[in-house]
Amino acid sequence: MENIKDISIIKDVNLKNYNTYKIEAKCDYLVDVLSIQGLMDLLAYLKNNNISYMILGNGSNVILDNYFKGVIIKLSGLNYVNISKNIVSVGAGAMMGSLAINTINENLTGLEWAINIPGTIGGSVVNNAGAYNSEMFDNLVSIKVLNKNLEVEEILKENIVYSYRHTNIKDLGFIVLEATFLLDDGDVEYSKEIIKDRCERRKSSQPLDMPSAGSVFRNPEGDFAGRLIEAVGLKGKKVGGAEVSNKHANFIVNTGNATSNDIKNLIKLIKDEVKKEFKIDLVLEQEIIDWK
């Protein structure tokens, strides 16, 4: 693996600073990929040697397990944003906030909602991330992926199965390399006003001062997960170092020493209590990564 070009390797890594919950989790190797060819060569090596691997974006919507015997792959080198008139092509490793700022500065509108999404483009496409009644697939045209045969393939939006916070991309074994969007002409000052409003609303309603991974559950149709959780009296409820935020009940925060088990046990408690009181099965928005 050390002889592969365009990759950077670190051994025996603590992933605490690679997930937004700040959970202590370790892996054998963390490999940062700097090019598509580097990724292809790396994956070929890992598959030939039967080594487990996982692509990790910004770690913003995941609950990591304690230890991964294998390779965690970051696509940080694929962080470009190319803009040609109304067409925007962006690498999977770029951050959503950076994409929003770049497009706004080019007088384009359609991605203002993404300014505070703490994820990468790749992860956001796979999970059809969204906010304020907007989502990735609103302006998506196509994606480039690496398929199971380690071939680069372009897929049009209409050939992807997607819904609220879900796509079939991961089910097909694809790794997102790039996404292309079609945006409308906008107005920089108006877009900045929208962003200012969204940032103020986020600051006033979300526990930004503590580690979390965003909304824990999807909102049930016609209702809000936070309202249901608060209604069953779980606001402020703690399990170990994990706590239901007192600021927003649909956020679990790490009070300092939360483990993945603390968070998973608190999630189960919330689901059980809401089901018992309201006969509603809350659907988890975050992804539990179970490496055992």
Image: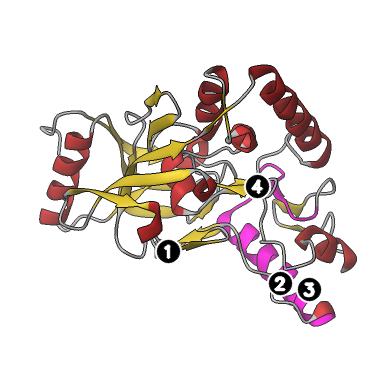
Q: Is residue 165 left or right of residue 113?
A: left
* Residue at (78, 82) in percent of width and height: 279
Q: How is the image coloured?
A: secondary structure
- Locate residue 257, reporting x and y percent: 64, 45
Q: Quadrant of the C terminus?
A: bottom left
Residue at numbered disc 3:
274
Q: Main secondary structure of the magenta part?
A: helix
Camera-near label (1 vs 4) is 1
Question: In the structure shown, which secondary structural element does the residue marked by tag 1 occupy?
Answer: loop
User: Are discs 4 and 2 less than 8 Å apart at CB?
Assistant: no
Earlier in the chain: of badge 4 and badge 2, it is 4
Residue range corresponding to the magenta coloring: 249-277
- In reply to whether residue 269 is colored magenta, the answer given is yes
- Amino acid residing under circle 4: Gly
Give the Cα separation between the discs numbered 3 and 2: 5 Å
Marks 4 and 3, how far apart at CA: 19 Å
Between disc 2 and disc 1, whose residue precedes?
1
What residue did someone put label 2 on?
A: 271
- The reply to whether dot 2 and dot 1 touch (C-beta < 8 Å) is no
Closer to the N terminus: mark 1 or mark 4? 1
- Residue at 15% x, 39% y: name it: 1
Q: From what the image shows, is residue 60 above or below residue 238?
A: above
Query: Which amino acid type corresponds to the residue marked 1 in the rendered image?
Result: Val
Tell me the number on the disc at residue 161.
1
Whichever of labels 4 and 3 marks the residue nearer the N terminus, that label is 4
